[in-house]
Structures are given as C-alpha cells and as structure tokens.
Amino acid sequence: MALRLLWASRVASHLRISVAQRGFASAVLKDLKYADSHEWVKIEGNKATFGITDHAQDHLGDVVYVELPELGHSVSQGKSFGAVESVKATSDINSPVSGTVVEVNKELTESPGLVNSSPYEQGWIVKVELSDAGEAEKLMDSDKYSKFCEEEDAKH
C-alpha cells in the first residue's frame, strides 16, 4: 500500500495534480485557484478561464445541459451566472472572480458531457476579462481545496 501511495504521489507531482492521502479521488490541478462552491479559475494576465471542478462534476453525475452567459455579461465573485443540469440535479455556477465575459465555450451547447470528461480542459465554461485581479487571493490553492473537499465529503 505504501509503495502504491508513493507511486501515486510521484505521478501526481509529474502531472501537476494533488492527491489527498485519505480517499479523496478527484483531480485537483496545482496551477489553479478554487472557490468553496467548487469552481476553478486559471488566471493568465488580465484574463481568467473558469469552470466547475472535477469534484463538482463527479457529485453532479452526467451533465446534460450547461446554461451559458452572453458575451459582455458582467460577473461578480461569488454570484451565480449560469447553471449546470445533470441527471441528478441542477446546480448554479458561481463566478470565482469578477469581470466581463469575453468568451463562452460554445462546444458545451452540443456536448455538455465535456464538463464530465474534461472539466479542466475541454469542459471550461467561460473566459472573462478581470475587473479585480486581487480577488483571486481570496480563493483556495490546490492543497487547501483538496483538504476542503475531503472534509466536506466526510460530513456526508
């Protein structure tokens, strides 16, 4: 068991993901920031790309519809801007940072399951021009988010 854990930790480090030590199995990428409402954000200059986390999509089940905002729509940190509908439930998507929507992932209209199969790459939801880059400091890094999910799952 110890060798498997050591191997998994080395692979995770190489792939830039975080592996929790006690049963938390969702992928958490190290170069992203995370909201406690289970959205991730990748900031590049004054632009941010975000979507829902692997942990969120795993709990939702098969995603069948993603409600996307219009281009130019203003989003605010912590406020809902859309929704994800799955076979289990409908869940609001909250913005991890504030800004103006400059691009939406139109592929999700035809293939909403990309949120399940590739939440951090092909399943991204929107790109925004940031209005306050400092807001990202209020978000969790990968280690804190992994611990947060582990504790949240233990409650259920």
Image (tube, rainbow, N blue to C red):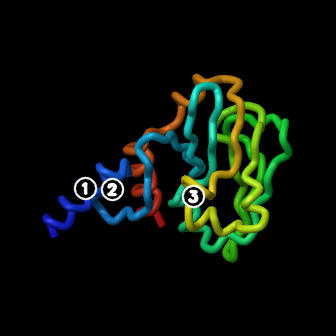
Q: Quadrant of residue 103?
A: top right
Image quadrant holding the N terminus, namely bottom left
Q: Position of residue 48 (x, y in %)?
A: 63, 36
Question: Looking at the image, is mark 3 or mark 1 earlier in the sequence?
Answer: 1
Identify the amino acid type marked 1.
Ser
Residue 78 in the image, given as x and y percentages of width and height: 67, 40
Front one among 59 and 64: 64
Q: Nearer the viewer, residue 27 or 95?
A: 27
Q: Is disc 3 in contact with disc 1, using a CB cutoff of under 8 Å?
A: no
Residue indicated by mark 2: 19
Mark 3 residue type: Pro
At 84% from the left and 36% from the top, the residue drawn is 72
Could you tell me which secondary element the residue under label 1 belongs to?
helix
Residue holding disc 3 = 119
> Residue at left 51%, top 60%?
55
Q: Residue at 68% of width from left, 28% of height from top?
A: 130
Q: Which mark is residue 94?
A: none
Position above or below: 116 against 49: below
**Disc 3 vs disc 2: Cβ atoms closer than 8 Å?**
no
Rounded to the nearest angstrom, the CA distance separating label 3 from label 2 is 17 Å
Furthest-bottom residue in this view: 87
Of callouts 1 and 2, the N-terminal one: 1
